[in-house]
Image (tube, rainbow, N blue to C red):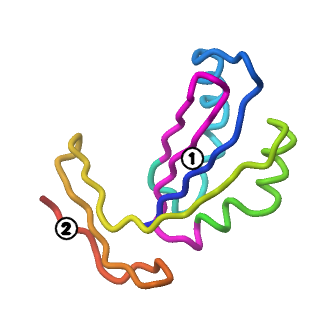
Amino acid sequence: MITALIEFDFPAGMTVAEAAEIFKQMAPEFRVMPGLIRKYCLFGGDSNVIGVCLWEDRASAERSFDENWRKKMAQRYGAEPQVIYYATPIVVDNALGIVEGEAISSSFGIISGAAAE
């Protein structure tokens, strides 16, 4: 698994309620991204936005966060987002009562499967 952190800014002075409305409008775009497991939308209260996306693999993330997506985001919000990728060897999900773990290679490709707690 791979986690991508996407950082950008909304216009200054936006409230958390306004940010939540924009996140809701963006949700359908993320619902159809192949390989996306989960997405969190974070608002820093000072216009700073961070998306936290858990992906099956890096290739899926990179296909979704391509040049067209970056340009669209820059047109919407005035600046191209920053995207950073992290290997995600373990996810603890207390709501589901599971721990998911993947052995990873140096290229962040999945080698083995999940383990239930």
| Label number found at residue 13 | none
Mark 2 and mark 1 in contact (Cβ < 8 Å)?
A: no
**Residue type for callout 2:** Ala
| Label number found at residue 115 | 2
**Residue type for callout 1:** Arg
**Is residue 8 found left or right of 104 in the rendered image?**
right
The residue that label 1 is drawn on is: 31
Residue 42 lies, with reference to residue 113, above or below; the image says above
Dot 2 crowding, Cα within 10 Å, few <14, some 14–19, many 20+: few
* Segment colored magenta: 39-60
Q: Residue at x 82, y 47 (%)?
A: 72
Q: Residue at x 69, y 53 (%)?
A: 82
Judging depth in this view, the residue of 103 and 24 nearest the camera is 103
Residue 56 lies, with reference to residue 108, above or below; the image says above
> Residue 47 location in percent, x, y?
67, 27
In the picture, residue 20 is in which quadrant?
top right
Q: Residue furthest front?
A: 46
Q: Quadrant of the C terminus?
A: bottom left
Q: Is residue 13 magenta?
A: no
**Is residue 115 found left or right of 37 in the rendered image?**
left
Q: Which is nearer the N-term, disc 1 or disc 2?
A: 1
